[in-house]
Image (cartoon, rainbow, N blue to C red):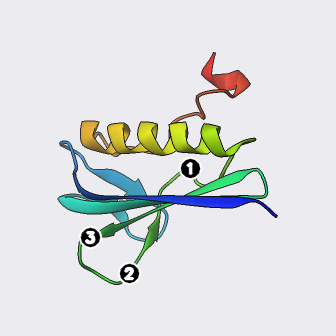
Amino acid sequence: MDWASWTTLGVLTGRGGVLTEEVGVLTGDLTVHTTWADSEARIAVQYSGASDWFTMSGSPVPSPSESDSRDLHDAVVAAIREGGAATVPSPPHSPSAQ
């Protein structure tokens, strides 16, 4: 089984924050974590320095390759910085992203 993960610390949310499955909207200084395994990417966020992780709304998503999941992680970080109750954007190489 192939897998990979990425973590970005200190992501400041834009106005409206990021939408999570468990607690709704989070705003402020967040840590973003993406795990890729079995052709699927899972995205979680937490308040930086906290111990609780929350599933970003729209996660998990299909992601056929490690490089696709890295691109998705970068797109997630950008979406969170933009705010607006951000959810996981369509994977960069998925049919719905075209």
Q: Earlier in the sequence, mark 1 or mark 3?
A: 3
Q: Is residue 35 visible?
A: no
Could you tell me which residue is drawn at 38 percent across and 81 percent down? Answer: 52
The amino acid type found where label 1 is placed reads Gly
Residue 68 lies in quadrant: top right
Instruction: Determine which of the numbered discs, if any, sits on residue 96 in the image.
Output: none
Q: Residues within 10 Å of mark 3 (few under 14, many from 20)?
A: some
Element under disc 3? strand
In the figure, is residue 91 to the left or right of 54? right
Residue 84 lies in quadrant: top left
Could you tell me which residue is drawn at 44 percent across and 70 percent down? Answer: 54
In the figure, is residue 17 to the left or right of 56? left
Look at mark 2 in the image and give the residue it sits on: 52
Look at mark 1 in the image and give the residue it sits on: 58
Q: Position of residue 2 (x, y in %)?
A: 76, 59
Element under disc 1? loop
Residues at marks 3 and 2 touching, judged by CB atoms closer than 8 Å: yes
How far is the residue under mark 3 from the one under mark 2?
8 Å
Q: Position of residue 50 (x, y in %)?
A: 27, 80
The outermost residue toward the top is: 98
Note whether 74 is above or below 47 in the view shown.
Answer: above
Q: In what quadrant of the picture does the N terminus appear? A: bottom right
Note whether 75 is above or below 47 in the view shown.
Answer: above
The amino acid type found where label 3 is placed reads Tyr
Q: Position of residue 83 (x, y in %)?
A: 27, 41
User: Toward the viewer: 7 or 27?
Assistant: 7
- Mark 1 vs mark 2, foreground winner is 2
Look at mark 3 in the image and give the residue it sits on: 47
Q: Residues within 10 Å of mark 2 (few under 14, many from 20)?
A: few
Residue 15 lies in quadrant: top left
User: Toward the viewer: 95 or 84?
Assistant: 95
